[in-house]
Amino acid sequence: MGRMQQKLQLVMQLAAVLMIGGSRLCEVSAGGYTGDTYWSPAHATFYGGDDASGTQGGACGYGNLYSQGYGTNTAALSTALFDEGLRCGACYQLICNQPRWCVPGAPVLTVTATNFCPPNWALPNDNGGWCNPPLQHFDLAVPAFIQLAQPIAGIVPVFYKRVPCERQGGLRFTINGNPWFLLVLITNVGGAGDVQQVSVMAEGTNWSWVPMQQNWGQNWQHQGNVLYGQTLSFKTTTSDGQTVVSNGVADSFWQFGQTFEGSQFSW
């Protein structure tokens, strides 16, 4: 690619950033997550194999990303972005900012945070330690990365911003643990996407809301009252301060390992 072509592609990429800033993708209904109003610089790499099989599981606790509905447009976040798992489920838009390696006419890519990219203290930040603090970095599933850039690049600069997550159906609550320890995985979160607070209510709690604690990723725990055999309701709050209540989401006959669908956030 000639120098003039590279400059032209850079101009086109920057123009796309400006156009996207005012696009309908950043508009949400009243009370929903409004997303960032500006783009920030970061870098992106890729992992997990061509079929993204190596991205399954991960530090958010989502397990099988295909069956959970996240697909292959996913990212592992660096320490600076991951926030000890509280950014799990957040959605980001990325645009390539390296004309030499950007896929010509590449669309703005929307990805969901589903994993953690750990720091590599043995390597410098500018030569392999891409996820070291304080770098803002996205380690993308291969099928996501190749929508933006040529894999031969290895690493490319990008612009990114938070955007609302669009999900089908309601929040999903997968109940694990044992009668004395409740561990609830929350998935399919629309709007802001990243759960920050969860409370549970059941007959054993005198029908009052009892706060749950983050265990790891988006697994939330309750330890104390035995809630097995009781109808459960959940109150969920995301990072934008919005709260939804899923009343009676699990009836009194629920079993460990089951998933139940509740209410959903607006976006």
Image (cartoon, rainbow, N blue to C red):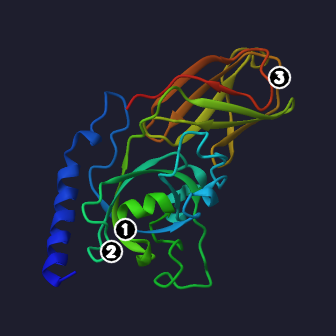
Instruction: Determine the CA span between mark 3 and mark 2.
Output: 54 Å
Image position of 96 with respect to 203: above or below: below
Q: Residue 181 vs residue 113: left or right?
A: right
The mark nearer the N terminus, 1 or 2, is 2
Residue displayed at 52% across by 33% down: 237
- Residue 149, numbered circle: 1
Residues at discs 1 and 2 in contact (Cβ within 8 Å): yes
Crowding near the residue tagged with mark 2, few <14, some 14–19, many ≥20 C-alpha atoms within 10 Å: some
Indicate the amino acid at tag 2. Answer: Trp
Q: CB of mark 3 within 8 Å of CB of mark 2?
A: no
Front residue (pair 73, 34): 73
User: In the rendered structure, which disc, 3 or 2, sits on the residue that comes first in sequence?
Assistant: 2
Which numbered disc, 3 or 1, marks the residue that appears first in the sequence? 1
* Viewer can see residue 141: no
The residue identified by callout 3 is: 228
Q: Residue at x 45, y 31 (%)?
A: 242
Residue indicated by mark 2: 101
Using the image as rendered, state which of residue 50 and residue 245 is in the foreground: 50
Q: Position of residue 145 (x, y in %)?
A: 43, 63
Pinpoint residue 140: horizontal percent, then vertical percent.
Answer: 49, 61
Q: Quadrant location of residue 233? A: top right
Label 1 and label 2: CA atoms lie apart by: 5 Å
Q: Amino acid at mark 1?
A: Ala
Mark 2 lies on a secondary structure that is loop
Give how far across and how far down residue 231 sits, in percent: 73, 15
> Which class describes the residues within 10 Å of circle 1: few (<14), some (14-19), or many (20+)?
many
- Quarter of the image with the N terminus is bottom left
Q: Are marks 3 and 1 in contact (CB under 8 Å)?
A: no
Q: Position of residue 110 (x, y in %)?
A: 39, 50
